[in-house]
Image: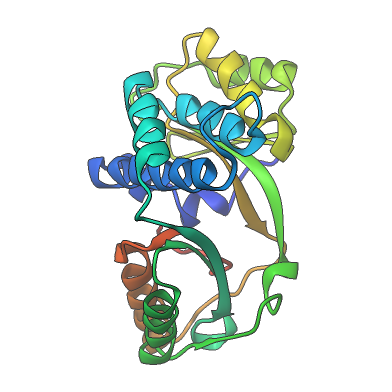
Amino acid sequence: MSGHSKWANIKHKKEKTDKARAKIFTKIGKELTIAVKEGGPDPASNSKLRDLIQKAKANNVPNENIERTIKKADGTKGESFEEITYEGYGPAGVAVIVVTSTDNRNRTAGNVRSYFSKYHGNMGTSGCVSFMFEDKGMIVINDEDGDYEEDTLMEQALEAGAEDFAATEGIYEITTDPADVYAVADALKELKYNINSAEVTKLPSTYVELTSDDDIKFMGLLLDMLEEDEDVLDVYHNWENCDR
């Protein structure tokens, strides 16, 4: 098993805050809306919606919220969201993938392009950096209070189907095949573990270390702007030793 996961430094410190938790709920709500618009409100005939309902439950979204979002999406004819992914480079060639959900692709593309340009990066073409990332399931359990026994959790996660396990500063990260992430999360919830997040994510195969103060400053500003944009669902990058 890996003793250290750089992924801990990339994403999950912010997910420990209430603001980040609200962002997860908003993100899943948008994804549910898109799925209903594309394939209808019945999960029995809409596999994408079925998977998202499972994702929502794994991330502790209340059932009533899920049902309300589906009903609203099915009854709303005016709004039409689509999911668009942008790729580019931050300072010093850091690879960046930006996943968005938008009802106005011109607005979203313009905003994303401006963030890259303003903070010493540039938006590239589709596929320019995605080959550097691999889809994986990622389950995060926050145990800063030391409530869980690490060896026991690791054994139970692996028995449930996990591929890898890492512990970093009170956070347990459980890696799975993308198809298994919600089943593993459900198994751990049955064992009374509190799941912080469970999702299919993108892990970089290589990392870029930033040593220039300016590069570090502008890369941080770029990520801040992207993460604060209401159209942005997810941001993935390969900046090593990042604190987010």
Q: Quadrant of the N terminus?
A: top right
- Vertical arrangement, residue 104 with respect to residue 6, above or below: below
- Vertical arrangement, residue 106 with respect to residue 166, above or below: below
In depth, the one of 120 and 130 nearer the eye is: 130
Q: Quadrant of the C terminus?
A: bottom left
Question: Which residue occupies the extreme left position in the image?
Answer: 18
In depth, the one of 139 and 29 nearer the eye is: 29
In depth, the one of 80 and 105 nearer the eye is: 80
Residue at x 66% of width, y 34% of height = 47
Question: Which residue occupies the extreme top position in the image?
Answer: 191
Residue at x 33% of width, y 21% of height = 64
Residue at x 39% of width, y 71% of height = 104
Residue at x 49% of width, y 48% of height = 34
**In screen coordinates, is 3 left or right of 99?**
right
- Vertical arrangement, residue 231 with respect to residue 105, above or below: above
Residue 234 at least partly seen: no
**In screen coordinates, is 240 left or right of 74?**
right
* Position in image of residue 218 (x %, y %): 37, 83
**In screen coordinates, is 163 left or right of 19?**
right
**In screen coordinates, is 221 left or right of 42?**
left
* Position in image of residue 126 (x %, y %): 67, 77
* Position in image of residue 219 (x %, y %): 41, 78
Total labels: the figure holds 0
Residue 110 at least partly seen: yes
The image quarter containing residue 67 is top left
